[in-house]
Amino acid sequence: MDQYEICRETMRAIALGDDDKAHRLYRQLDAAGEGVYEVALTMMFLAALQVRFGTADLDLAAAQGFASELQADHADTEPPVLESNVESLIRGVWSEEHLLDGLERDEEERLQHLAIRKIYSDSDDMQQRFDDYLADVENMTRYWVANEALPD
């Protein structure tokens, strides 16, 4: 498998809640592949947010409601899922990038995983058309990698 195939299958494992498989796949990536993964995860998160919230301007109450749901779904998780972090992540990728400054990269990634999994499990459309979503994410990732600098 090339790095894009690994990333695609990692996104599938994340959505399905198969953390062990996601970690096994991630460990197959080299340094450049890890950069591709970062882009792919962001693109998958954005795709999931569009499923949940649509493509219009983000409604603050909707973001807060989702943050509350995600926290409730993972009430026993350590470290705890904080509503404020989930809201910052959503608003940060939507249009308020400065809100991401307060999140550690590991926490951002963990919350992206949990959000993708929740949105996938809550959306019949996303489940039925998941291969299409994965193809779109891969295409957007390939475009980004070809035209922009990879994350550090």
Image: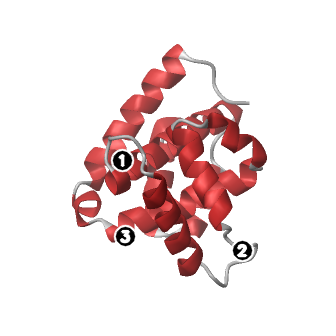
Inter-mark Cα distance, 1 to 2: 25 Å
Q: What amino acid is labelled 1 in the image?
A: Gln
Kindly indicate the quadrant of the structure image that contains residue 137: top left
Query: Which label is found at residue 121?
Result: 3
Q: What amino acid is labelled 3 in the image?
A: Ser
Question: Residue 12's x, y, as percent?
Answer: 43, 57
Q: What amino acid is labelled 2 in the image?
A: Pro
Question: Residue 48's x, y, as percent?
Answer: 40, 52
Query: Which label is found at residue 50?
Result: 1
47 w.r.t. 110: above or below: above
Callout in the foreground (2, 3): 2
Query: Which image quarter holds the C terminus?
Result: top right
* Residue at screen point 66% across, 61% down: 84
Give the mark, 1 or 3, whose residue is nearer the N terminus: 1
Q: Could you tell whether 118 is left or right of 109 in the image?
A: left
* Residue at screen point 51% across, 61% down: 115
Question: Residue 18's x, y, as percent?
Answer: 51, 69
Asked if labels 3 and 1 touch by Cβ distance under 8 angstroms, the answer is no
Residue at disc 2, secondary structure: loop
* Residue at screen point 53% across, 35% down: 95
